Amino acid sequence: MTLAGDAYWLPVIFIGLMGLALLLYAVLDGYDLGVGILLPGDKESQRDMMIASIGPFWDANETWLVLGVGLLLIAFPRAHSLILMHLYLPVTLMLAGLILRGVAFDFRAKVPPHNKNLWDWTFKGGSLLATLAQGYMIGMFVVGFERSWAAFGFALLSAVCVTAGYCFIGGAWLVMKADGELQQRAARWTRRACWLTALGIAAVTGVNLIGNTEIFQKWFDAPVLLIIPLLGAMAFIGVETYLRRFPIAGDAGCWIPFVGCLIIFIASFAALGYSFFPDIVPGQMNIWQAASASKSLWFILVGTLIVLPAIILYTMFSYRIFWGKTRELTYY
Amino acid sequence: MPDTFLLSRIQFAANISFHILFPTITIALCWFLLFFRVQYNRTGDEVWMRCYRFWVKIFALSFALGVVSGITMSFQFGTNWPGYMETVGNVAGPLLGYEVLTAFFLEATFLGIMLFGINRVSPRVHTLATLLVAIGTSLSAFWILALNSWMQTPAGFEMRDGTAFPLSWWQIIFNPSMPYRVTHMLLASGLTAAFLIAGISAYRLLQGDHKPAPRLALKTGVFAAAVLIPLQILVGDLHGLNTLQHQPAKIAAMEAVWETEQGAPFTLFAIPDETARSNRFAIEIPKAASFILTHDWNGEVRGLNEFVGKHPPVKPVFYGFRVMLGVGVLMLLVAWCCSWLLWRRAELSRLWLKILVAMTFSGWIATLAGWYVTEIGRQPYLVTGVLETRAAVTSVAPGNVGFSLMIYLTLYAVLLVAYISTLFVMARKSVLVDRPEDLPSLQEKLNPITQTDHYRENTGGAS
């Protein structure tokens, strides 16, 4: 394909922006979905604290999904239709999960106490449903929406892997934001989830490389990029070492699991992106075939470049306000 | 088994009807919150802050429901209506994108500070956060209504090979019906929030809440409604004239005018019969439709006969319009009577309080009815003159759409019941807390948003 000028690079910029939005979504909503999945059945006070730790953030976190899907819709409308048509049922289940957990968050605090447990279970179940659906969708995407038992199996593996990943980052968030008994508990959860995530990523990568010679060739051609999985592996070792020695006097380095997990997420995204670029629907459609008119992309790009830094700035402002350990429900 | 097209339409209607309930509240409620907050800053009167504290919780709950049902909307386009983005994506995409970028993040981020940050930031920053959320919700309304208006009265684009290409973003955004629709919807939101505030506050008073906060909130809601409703009637009239100019088929269906005529009557009630092309049991005001629409008793109103095959189904549009008008008139009566009574005696009788409770969700009914008029009134088109609804639908199997529709309908029914009952639960709970004579100790103990750890252990806590 010969495309020159903005018709060539506008789609490239937009796939980059979309990747960034989805990465931020996976990290940010990842930790609050993870916290939701990890909600323990036995200690109500711990549930309160866990939910308080994500209270100020979850709304904005979920907005990154709207932006990611929005960018797909805006910049690559043909891919948007194709992808969502294939993923009709998992999308429905994910939305049901997100709806349930989003409202459970507010209802649990406002209903009579005897209904609170019900909404807590809704919160946990909704989080799990949304996460499984997301993992399943990534799996189906990777295999190009193939409809075979092998493909479904792979998608299920991916669902488990993403669930482990979200539990990992959710646990790491709690290690950072909680203290006392809850923090101890979170460290144990995180360590288990960390191992499961590593196994999951290894399995998904292995299946992918064996099953898809083109991707294998791509990585073989640019061995310098093996730094990406290497970084991920180092982060994994770092987190595991830290958690094995937990708790550490003075709570030193309570941020290490979260940052380590962040690196693993970034590495996984980068690897996934490199494997499939420039296809937006693997094996079926590339970004230039799917792209919108240049004039539309320009119009939205200008706005994005102005607004996105502002969003990042005030998001950081918000995180700074709620910096440090989560205190009792100082809801307002 | 109904086909994918019908199921997708029902699903879209269900999603958007459920969704719009909550933005309709939050868009204006946040400006009310800002008013409470600013009044507190200005006067230092604790009562304003108590109004803020009570209503910010309802705001948070409504906002959460708006966010989650809004996410569903952003997926709907791709899952059920792929033809929409494939045909007009070059126009619709950027407008949706600007909504996410300029509004969604702003409101979601500062909502966190507004709800949970009051003890962590200065009053000034907290007021600013409230203002930014209010701006965010209104901006969001601006962008989505710009897009909806463009679908009603498209402008500033050209078609090339069956795809819309933008020519002028100014003309696209400020298309002919946009200023009217945005104003009409913002006022609708103001009225919805005003009657919600008045209704829930009246409920608290009826439950024996003798604190000054619900009294003050009730007054705020009633006076706001009394000011907004005449404005709304005026803007609604202008919006109607604009529709007559750009979408005459919709007006013909709203008025159930079957044949073009001069001096057309306004039909108060009738049963429109689409096969016989006439109105049964019609109660009419002679020449009134001509007067309202053309401001001339003998003006010509174009009938449905001029739009055969290209006009919307008559019944839902005709009835929807009358429901909206009827609720509007009711709002006018109630708001003005209550305002007058409050003005004269500063106290409402129990009967009036009950009427206000009954009117709590009147804004929802009028807003939904109005949206049905405008959306069904656009049929058979998705984008007037550009894309027919039928041409945009997905090829997903009807079984799948039926499955997702069942899930959504179940969820929405449960959530709607939970939402409404929770509002009243919160109102009852607030009756018990912060009695003025017990302040501050009881407030510290019982107010669900400031209660101590000890108390939360016993009650399960609240935000």
Image (cartoon, rainbow, N blue to C red):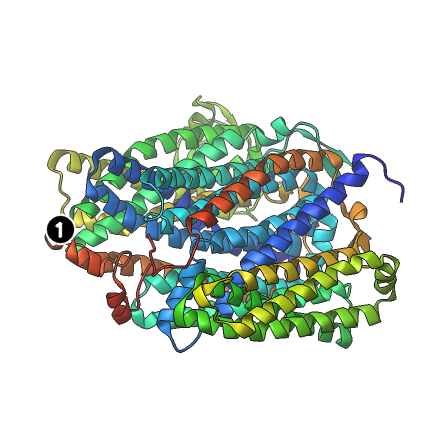
The residue at the point 78 percent across, 72 percent down is A207
Vertical side of B126 occupied by A212: above or below: below
Can you give x and y, in whole percent of width and height, for residue B102 in the image? 54, 39
**Amino acid type for the residue under numbered disc 1:** Pro
Can you give x and y, in whole percent of width and height, for residue A306 in the image? 60, 34
Can you give x and y, in whole percent of width and height, for residue A239 in the image? 59, 67
Q: Nearer the viewer, residue A234 or A116?
A: A234
Q: Nearer the viewer, residue B462 or A164?
A: A164
* Mark 1 Cα-neighbour bin, 10 Å: few <14, some 14–19, many ≥20: few
Vertical side of A294 occupied by B376: above or below: below
Vertical side of B246 occupied by B132: above or below: below
Q: Nearer the viewer, residue B363 or B66?
A: B66
Q: Is residue A178 at all visible to an observer of this figure? A: yes
Q: Which residue is mark 1?
A: B436
What subunit carries mark 1?
B
The residue at the point 63 percent across, 36 percent down is A305
Query: Does residue B221 appear left or right of residue B406 in this picture?
Result: left
Image quadrant assignment for residue B217: top left
Image quadrant assignment for residue A233: bottom right
Q: Nearer the viewer, residue B13 or A187?
A: A187
**Where, quadrant-wise, is the N terminus of chain A in this rendering?**
top right
Callout 1 secondary element: helix
The residue at the point 62 percent across, 66 percent down is A238
The residue at the point 23 percent across, 49 percent down is B201
Q: Is residue B325 at all visible to an observer of this figure? A: no
Can you give x and y, in whole percent of width and height, for residue B398 in the image? 65, 64
